[in-house]
Image (cartoon, helix red, strand yellow):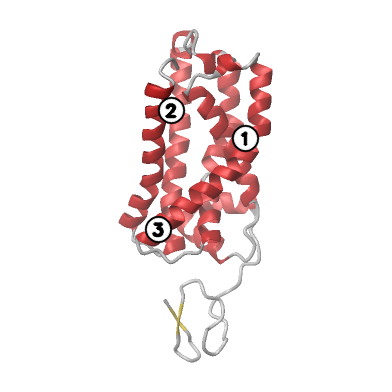
Amino acid sequence: MITCGVCGAQNDDYAVICVSCKAYLQAKVEGLDLFATIWGLIESPTATFRRIVLSKRKNFVALLAAVAGIAVVFGVIWFFRMGTRFTGLMSLMGFGMIGGPIAGIVTMLAASTFVQVAARIAGGKGKFRDTLATTTYASFPVGFSVFFIFPLLIANFGMYLFDQNPSPMVIKPVVYSLLLLFNIAALLWALGLTMIGLAVAHRLSRMRAILVGLILPILLGAAGLWLKSTVMPGT
């Protein structure tokens, strides 16, 4: 809580104007600069997430969600080895580039809704728009992998990346292992940022934020493994 220096009233941590005397409590943040905010998440994630929550306009949320969606679509095709369902690499790439942004926005809205409910159950106080903004900005490492790691995977393995016949691990085991490790690191980085964002947006303790942040990836991972082993056993 913030104590007003003028009248002594107690205000929410992210209040800009005192609820009692209308005095200014802290500086307003009108909007976000994409690159400055991403750099801030690298240097000082807690302070940057606080700025994101305080921001009046949550700029670039749709853009970041769209980029993350491209990674989600290609990740699903890779995980379920669905490359044979496309006529070639160009059609697969076109599908991911066109369908990815739509899938990303829908996925981010759904994920943020789930996280919002879970955070509220855990005692969180944040608004949905703050959950959406912090969750989406936390996904920027995934977007980084789309621009820097994914092209290297395509350049080295092409269509074999998605149909596993033969497996990329057979073609270039060292390169494939290193690039996969970079992708995993990006995912873990995004997950860690999500937990920090949850703690900031919902005023949660670190432990509660970790628990809330882990629920969704665990459920999605379990569902993916179940689908792969039962519904799509041939993949």
Image point 41% across, 44% down: which residue?
A: 216
Decide: few, some or many residues near mark 2? Use Cα within 10 Å; few <14, some 14-19, many ≥20. few
Residue 140 drawn at (x, y percent): 55, 43
**Measured along the vertical axis of the image, is residue 78 above or below residue 142?**
above
| Amino acid type, callout 2 | Leu
Label 3, on which residue? 119
Image point 56% across, 76% down: which residue?
A: 16
Distance (Cα) linking label 2 and label 3: 30 Å
Q: Is residue 89 left or right of residue 2?
A: right
Distance (Cα) linking label 3 and label 1: 27 Å
Image point 65% across, 56% down: which residue?
A: 59
Image point 53% across, 24% down: which residue?
A: 77
Residue 42 in view (yes/no): no
Tag 3's secondary structure?
helix
Decide: few, some or many residues near mark 1? Use Cα within 10 Å; few <14, some 14-19, many ≥20. many
- Find the residue positioned furthest to the front: 231
Residue 61 drawn at (x, y percent): 61, 51
Distance (Cα) linking label 2 and label 1: 23 Å
Label 1, on which residue? 100
Residue 200 drawn at (x, y percent): 44, 61
Residue 235 drawn at (x, y percent): 45, 17
Tag 2's secondary structure?
helix
Label 2, on which residue? 181
Comparing marks 2 and 1, which lies closer to the viewer? 1
Instruction: Decide which of tag 2 and tag 1 comes sooner along the chain.
Output: 1
Tag 1's secondary structure?
helix
Quarter holding the N terminus?
bottom left
| Amino acid type, callout 3 | Ala
Comparing marks 2 and 3, which lies closer to the viewer? 3
**Measured along the vertical axis of the image, is residue 16 above or below residue 176?**
below
